Amino acid sequence: MDANEVSDLHSIRATAKLDRVSVELLAEDHEGRLAVQTFGQAAPNFMDGFVEEFGFERYENAFVFGWVPRHALVEITIERAERDGRFPVAGASNRSCVGAGPSGRVWRAGAGLER
């Protein structure tokens, strides 16, 4: 089946800031911690700090990955890709700030949609 024939086809990217560094949110564990990885070019001193503070794993000096408590993250956002696979620019209408409920699970504000 051609992808253009499928309705409600979406690609979602969740991002946040960890100590002024952009990270991608990947998962949540049973304790409410979030798995994140740096994306783009993070300065080596920030990557070293994440390895020391949170026990992140380093991958070929290109990025680091690890688990952080939700309160360590700020500016959590969720972006939905357009049908052509491109993510909108900052400020586009389908970009929303999100927060977390008492369980620590990430939720999306606006349009009555959650999680």
Image (tube, grey):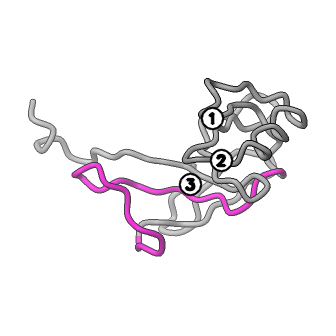
Q: Quadrant of residue 21?
A: bottom right
In the rendered image, which residue does mark 1 sit on? 63
Instruction: Give me the residue at 59% from left, 52% from top.
Output: 15
How crowded pointer 3 is (Cα within 10 Å; few <14, some 14-19, many 20+) is rated as few
In the rendered image, which residue does mark 2 sit on? 42
Say which of 109 and 67 sits in front. 67
Task: Point out the stretch of residues depicted in magenta.
Answer: 72-93
Q: Amino acid at mark 2?
A: Ala
Measured Cα–Cα span from mark 3 to mark 2: 30 Å
Left or right relative to 112: residue 21: right
Q: Amino acid at mark 1?
A: Phe
Q: Position of residue 57 (x, y in %)?
A: 73, 25
In the rendered image, which residue does mark 3 sit on? 114
Instruction: Give me the residue at 59% from left, 47% from top.
Output: 41
Q: Position of residue 65 (x, y in %)?
A: 68, 31
Measured Cα–Cα span from mark 1 to mark 3: 30 Å
Specify whether residue 30 is painted magenta. Answer: no
Q: Secondary structure at mark 1?
A: strand
Q: Is residue 51 above or below residue 20?
A: above
Q: Position of residue 18 (x, y in %)?
A: 75, 52
Q: Secondary structure at mark 2?
A: loop
